[in-house]
């Protein structure tokens, strides 16, 4: 953890956010809502009126909200194989959003969707929302809309504990680095690290397997994600260096649904106490306090 505190390029919020990860796939011990075993509870809004939102109309007629998530990112979006229970910071942000729209946990359908398929899933109407380490970028904004940001982190590196040659992104020349197809980190490596070889999978957990088996030298993605993997196997894995990009997480929405975007942005703006509860019960379990980022109502 000590590395993150010396970070120069990121703002204070990002610094604290990355430093604060408690590295647990389990939720907190707060009051439970029906259908969840852990994490805070949320008041399910009644008689929500949201005019001019085709996505909300669809949720109402379906009687449920379909939320795209990650299922293999401990601490953020993780599905317990034994119980089928989802947990993590992103999952709680999704549950909070659903409750604000009038949908309790029993009215949420989580759909695991990998990084490369997020824009198409939203455009095709396969999901109503996406909450899964989804960076707000100008390129993606051409295809989808974002509410938020609700969290800030940055690209980092995961290596084997025994590795003493890769200490930061400056040591990647001639190395084979793994990341997820369609992600901002793989795009950054391809664009700005011409002497670095890349390996791609649809998910980061496959990259972690490749790292453990020695097929690749490092895994790169958001440090918040990498810390989750390192925490699951600290004897084998470590996060090195400092975040070298800024990744702002947004809730992905179908393009043009401004009413829904405004609604969720207001939820974030007015829901500081809930945000803090969510953070404290997931990524912040180490006890570190983090500021919620300010919403960017573009
Ligand atoms: N936040 C980055 C992205 O949206 C990396 C994590 C991910 O692939 O979900 O591409």
Image (cartoon, rainbow, N blue to C red):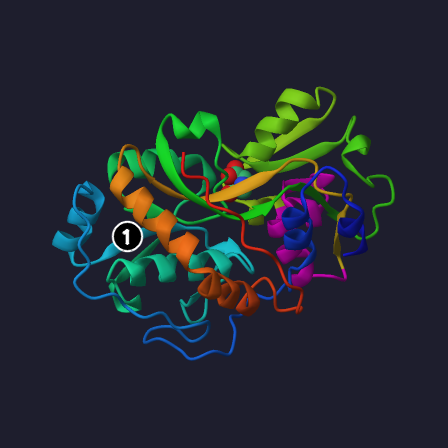
Report if residue 226 lies within the magenta region: yes
> Relative to 97, does residue 39 appear above or below in the rendering?
below
| In-image side of 195 versus 60 (left or right) | right
> Relative to 170, does residue 98 appear above or below in the rendering?
below
- Determine the residue located farthest toward the right in the rendered image: 164
Q: Quadrant of residue 169?
A: top right
- Determine the residue located farthest toward the left in the rendered image: 61
Q: Residues within 10 Å of mark 1 (few under 14, many from 20)?
A: many
| In-image side of 90 versus 106 (left or right) | right
Q: Nearer the viewer, residue 169 or 290?
A: 290
Q: In the image, what residue occupies the spot 26% across and 35% down? A: 124
| In-image side of 250 versus 123 (left or right) | right
Q: Quadrant of residue 95?
A: bottom left
State the quadrant of the N terminus.
bottom right
Report if residue 110 lies within the magenta region: no
> Pointer 1: what residue?
66
Whole-percent x, y for residue 114 in the image: 44, 43
| In-image side of 162 versus 225 (left or right) | right
Q: Nearer the viewer, residue 228 or 297?
A: 297
Q: In the image, what residue occupies the spot 54% across and 41% down? A: 248
Whole-percent x, y for residue 12 in the image: 68, 48
Q: Which residues are magenta?
A: 208-235
State the quadrant of the C terminus.
top left
């Amino acid at each position: 953890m000590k590395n993150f505190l010396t970070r120069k390029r990121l703002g204070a919020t990002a610094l604290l956010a990355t430093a604060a990860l408690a590295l647990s796939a389990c939720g907190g011990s707060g009051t439970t809502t029906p259908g969840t075993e852990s994490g805070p509870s949320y008041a399910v809004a009644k008689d929500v009126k949201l005019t001019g939102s085709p996505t909300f109309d669809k949720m109402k007629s379906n009687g449920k909200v379909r939320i795209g998530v990650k299922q293999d990112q401990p601490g953020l979006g993780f599905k317990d194989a034994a119980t089928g229970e989802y947990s993590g910071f992103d999952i709680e942000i999704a549950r909070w959003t659903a409750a604000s729209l009038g949908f309790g946990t029993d009215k949420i359908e989580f759909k695991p969707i990998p990084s490369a398929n997020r824009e198409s899933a939203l455009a095709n109407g396969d999901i109503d929302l996406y909450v899964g380490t989804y960076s707000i970028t100008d390129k993606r904004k051409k295809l989808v809309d974002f509410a938020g940001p609700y969290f800030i982190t940055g690209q980092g590196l995961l290596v084997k504990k025994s590795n003493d040659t890769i200490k930061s992104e400056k040591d990647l020349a001639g190395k084979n680095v793994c990341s997820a197809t369609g992600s901002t980190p793989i795009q950054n490596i391809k664009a700005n690290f011409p002497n670095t070889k890349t390996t791609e999978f649809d998910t980061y957990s496959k990259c972690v397997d490749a790292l453990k088996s020695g097929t690749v030298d490092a895994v790169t993605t958001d440090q918040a994600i990498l810390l989750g993997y390192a925490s699951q196997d600290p004897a084998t894995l470590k996060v090195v260096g400092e975040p070298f990009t800024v990744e702002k997480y947004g809730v992905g929405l179908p393009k043009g649904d401004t009413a829904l975007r405004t609604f969720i942005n207001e939820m974030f703006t007015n829901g500081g106490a809930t945000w803090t509860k969510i953070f404290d019960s997931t990524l912040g379990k180490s006890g570190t306090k983090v500021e919620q980022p300010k919403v960017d109502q573009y």
